[in-house]
Image (cartoon, rainbow, N blue to C red):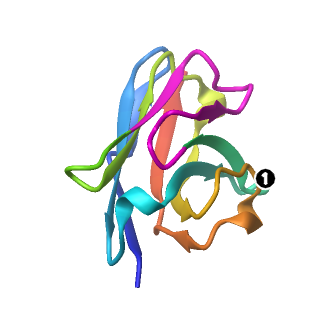
Amino acid sequence: QVQLVESGGGLVQAGGSLRLSCTFSGGAFSSYAMAWFRQTPRKEREFVAVISLRGSTLIYAESVKGRFTVSKDNAKNTVYLQMNSLKPEDTAVYYCTAGLEVRVRQDEYKYWGQGTQVTVSS
């Protein structure tokens, strides 16, 4: 079945940038909307960004709008999350997920990756 693997997490100073990648396998990548969520020990998993099947629709959480950019490369079966102007509040485990429709709720997605840690120091 569909498998997602995130990578690119790490430690970065506030104001810095980081790009996360999520590789997709086991299905038709172009048939899925791809989204990013994040989770900290003190908060429930929250929506970050989503990109539609063809990439024509982009939705971002208000907290990351203007700083993060989600994109996809169908030739590489990969979705990216470019994170700029990072803040300590962005520290979390970031998860990639795939769904049949563009949604912002965690329970509306079917497939998930293992997550990648992003830590932003001040």
Q: In the image, what residue occupies the spot 56% across and 48% down?
A: 36
Q: Is residue 83 visible?
A: yes
Q: Quadrant of residue 19?
A: top left
* Front residue of 86 and 48: 48
- Does 15 lie within the magenta span? no
Q: Indicate left or right for 69 with 78 as reference.
A: right
In the depicted structure, whether residue 26 falls above or below residue 49: below
Which span of residues is magenta-colored?
52-71
Residue pictured at 60% horizontal, 28% vertical: 88
Quadrant where the C terminus sits is top right
Q: Is residue 70 magenta?
A: yes
Image point (38%, 57%), residue name: 30
Residue 93 visible in this rendered orientation of the protein: no
What amino acid is labelled 1 in the image? Arg
Q: Position of residue 105 (x, y in %)?
A: 77, 56
Which residue appears farthest toward the bottom when viewing the image? 1
Give the left or right position of residue 42, taking residue 122 as reference: right
Element type at marker 1?
loop
Report which residue position mark 1 lands on: 42
Residue 58 falls in image quadrant: top right
Q: 81 and 76: which one is in front?
A: 76
73 displayed left or right of 63: left
The tally of labels here is 1
For residue 21, above or below residue 100: above
Main secondary structure type of the part rendered in magenta: loop
